Amino acid sequence: MSINSYLRCFKCHHNEAMYHCLLLLLLPCIAEIEAKADNKPPQPRIVGGTPCSTKTYPFAVSVRLSEIFAAGNYNHYCGGSLVNSKWVLSAAHCYSEDRNNQLEDYLVVAGISLQSDYKNPKAQRSKVETIVTKGYEGDEHHNDIALLKLKTAMRKTKAVDFSTLPGNNLYPRDLVEINPICTAMGWGIMVPLDPLGFNLVDDISKLYPDNLMCVNLPLIRFYQCKKIFAEKAPDLVITNSQMCTLHHKGEKDACGGDSGGPLVCNNIQQGITSWGLGCALEGYPGVFTRTFQDDRHWPP
């Protein structure tokens, strides 16, 4: 099976726990029967990070998915960032049609650092009214960007605020020179995964954190990222809508469940967590969708 075949298989279903991951690898794409709560986007993408807070990153939100057998319960599904009171920026692959999720299945929660606090009265919650994408191409994750319109407006507080997006004239090569270290954040998998999604953790409770996690990641030049994938995974293409990070020892990265979350460079959200071949593997970059100031305005 080619690398792209594995990625397509992973794209169908995510694994809430390690045994789900192994099942998917042994019996590719048979998990149509799994609960919606287990239908998170997998490989496409904090490993090696530290706990952080929405008081530091008040635009970070959790996009949650309803449990099919437990009405009123929602599990973390993808990350996102609040760009104004009614719109959340996230990754398009989280909401692709092949996931078979409905708008009413999603709940956006802001103002929490702990996942276990999503029902706390201090948390702000909203259902999703509509989801808009912009030229998303699934095979290459080109333009892997989505905007979620909220039914209920979010209010600014110490733990809820709006993301700052960059101007439209900054290219990845310039960004590397200006600020080579950026911060990714999310509630995703905390252990390294190989290209097929395996990990060696012996306790599945260690896979996902309760607390929001942040990790500092070095940016690499666009041509370097293209060269690495051309040599190591020629089936995968890096497009001009993307930018890459790479820790020299492969000990830090975004991972499954972090998809859609922000990549922040010098207090500006320059990217959206998109995908990677495995997680935190030495020599393999993490790939992010680039953001622009006009990403606030393109929804109809």
Image (cartoon, rainbow, N blue to C red):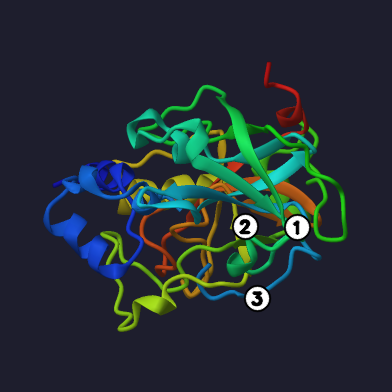
Task: Where is residue 278? Give x, y as percent.
Answer: 36, 60
Q: Can you say whether 70 is above or below 101 in the image? A: below
Between disc 1 and disc 3, the foreground one is 3
Task: Where is residue 178? Give x, y as percent.
Answer: 78, 54
Separation of marks 1 and 2 at Cα, in angstroms: 8 Å
Amino acid type at mark 3: Pro
User: Does any portion of residue 43 appear in the rendered image?
Assistant: no
* Residue linked to disc 2: 219
Disc 2 crowd, CA 10 A, few/some/many (<14, 14-19, 20+): many
Q: Are marks 1 and 2 in contact (CB under 8 Å)?
A: yes
Residue at the right extreme, as displayed:
157
Amino acid type at mark 1: Asn
* Residue linked to disc 3: 51
Q: Which element is circle 3 on?
A: strand
Question: Which numbered marker is on residue 179?
Answer: 1
Q: Earlier in the sequence, mark 2 or mark 3?
A: 3
Residue pictured at 52% horizontal, 71% vertical:
252
Separation of marks 1 and 3 at Cα, in angstroms: 22 Å
Disc 3 crowd, CA 10 A, few/some/many (<14, 14-19, 20+): some
Q: Earlier in the sequence, mark 1 or mark 3?
A: 3
Q: Can you say whether 289 is above or below 23 in the image? A: above
